[in-house]
Image (spheres, grey):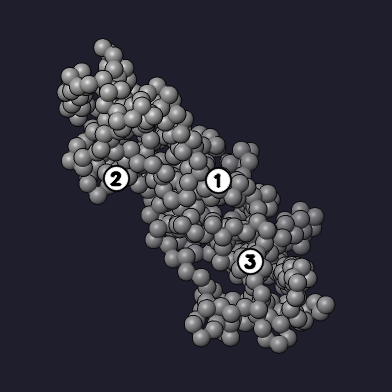
Amino acid sequence: MIGKLTRHLQVSQEQISSNLTLKEQLPSQNKPNRVPAQTLNPQQDYFVKFESAEDKAQREANLEDTLSRPIIFGFSKTYVRPQVTLSGLGTEHLNKSYQFGELTNEADIEDFLAQGDRFPPDQRHKFQHLKPTQELLELSKKLSDEDFAKFADIIVNMAEFNPKTGRFNNISEDLIDKFNSMSEETLSSTLHTMSHILEQGQAHDFSPYSSPAGILDAKGQEDALLNRYDKDHHIFSRSFGMQERANLNRYANIILDNKLTDEQLLELNAHIDESDYETNVGIIDMAKTIKPYQQDSFFAMLSEVDKSNNQNVFTLVSKQLDWREHKHYLQTDSEEYVINHDALTSERERQDFYSNLLNAFDQVGLGWMNEVIEFTFDTPAKSQPAIWHELIKDLEETPEDFIRSDSIESWVNSNIDSLVHSFIEQQIKDMHKYNETLDMPFNLSGLNYVAIDKNEGDEYMSTSNVALNQ
């Protein structure tokens, strides 16, 4: 393709030399002293542009600014054809320079374009969204056709929402650099794992849980008296396919943060490969969040857990990152509904939660933990960190209370109601506090928490009933 382009440029140079001077070609001296860019013929596979040195500098600055902007959907630019710039117009020397993304060498550009031809037609467009760089060229030549196809699927799905900035980021270039530093075995395993995680996210059902009876209007929409959104609740985190990609991005950040050695990463990949979506959400976030000194305990627990059990410790953990688990219904005395949309459990809170889980594993083992989970799995997600905090504190302070075979059931019967009560009380306080900020507050007397049966879709009133009348 570059050869064809060079021949075309030679013809262009001859035509320019045989014509009038550039100044004579312009009908008015007030017009800028340059030839307009050539109109692109759809049948051509190259693009020729005539510009001055100032134009080129401005164009490159504009391009760099565009590429540095956070994006929302996919990538902000496609790279289909290399650009060739002609300079020295009106002189004896017509110079040609090539640019395709960051590539400026003609041979590298040809090599890069050849990599795109390795894809089937239905996937080739994904490669065209990637900025041509030396690093990407180097990586693409390392990969087999199968891994190259996985890479293209993965890399164009790496947009993530950053709640700290309120913007969408793309970490694809950082990942390409990281992939280039991996061994062949680790790279192939990682691409397989990321492809598996992406497919799980795309196949997972993120449908909301059934709403309580009486909240739906004639159109089937929730007609709540009041909706409160936590200040750290970000609706964009659930939009534009962000939920489908969230677990993929968590895994990518494990790689970028150098959390694990190659051996640990290969072990993690093997466990992810045999686990379902919810289990993998818990596995990946715990691996991402825990401290380095906790990794031995984490991998030991990971090896023992029964991943076929849909109520294992990692599916319990996954609730902290499920938006549906943080949407709470409350009802007034007049049977009108209000909804509190909590943010996800913070990273600091999850760090403490995971520390307590790993402490329990080290002290009393997974069997003991599974018994606790059996009694507490259906409690609200935001109450679970508090439950495990109190449980581990009591275990350390009064270990003699946990000797009997029924000690866990006894502890649950004595403590769960008060812990869930505290969670419900906070929900009601949040709603009253928000209501008071409104210009025309609603009457929210006698708020009761409505717990949803997420398996059957039927609602029931919480036994830990709290009413705060204001």
Camera-nearest residue between 361 and 66: 66
Residue 302 shown left or right of residue 137 in the figure: right
Q: Earlier in the sequence, mark 2 or mark 1?
A: 2
Pointer 3 residue: 341
Pointer 1 residue: 287
**How many numbered dots are placed on residues in this image?**
3
Of the 4 image quadrants, the one containing the C terminus is bottom right
- Residue 29, given in percent of the width and then of the height, sits at 36, 27
Q: Mark 2 vs mark 1: give the one in front.
A: 2
Is residue 372 shown above or below 32?
A: below
Q: Which amino acid, mark 1?
A: Ala
**Crowding at label 2, few (<14), some or many (≥20) Cα neighbours within 10 Å?**
some
Camera-nearest residue between 251 and 405: 251
Q: CA distance from mark 3 to mark 1?
A: 27 Å
The residue located at (51%, 86%) in the rendering is: 218
Pointer 2 residue: 125
Residue 283 shown left or right of residue 355 in the figure: left
Q: CA distance from mark 2 to mark 1?
A: 34 Å
- Residue 425, given in percent of the width and then of the height, sits at 76, 71
Q: CA distance from mark 3 to mark 2?
A: 39 Å
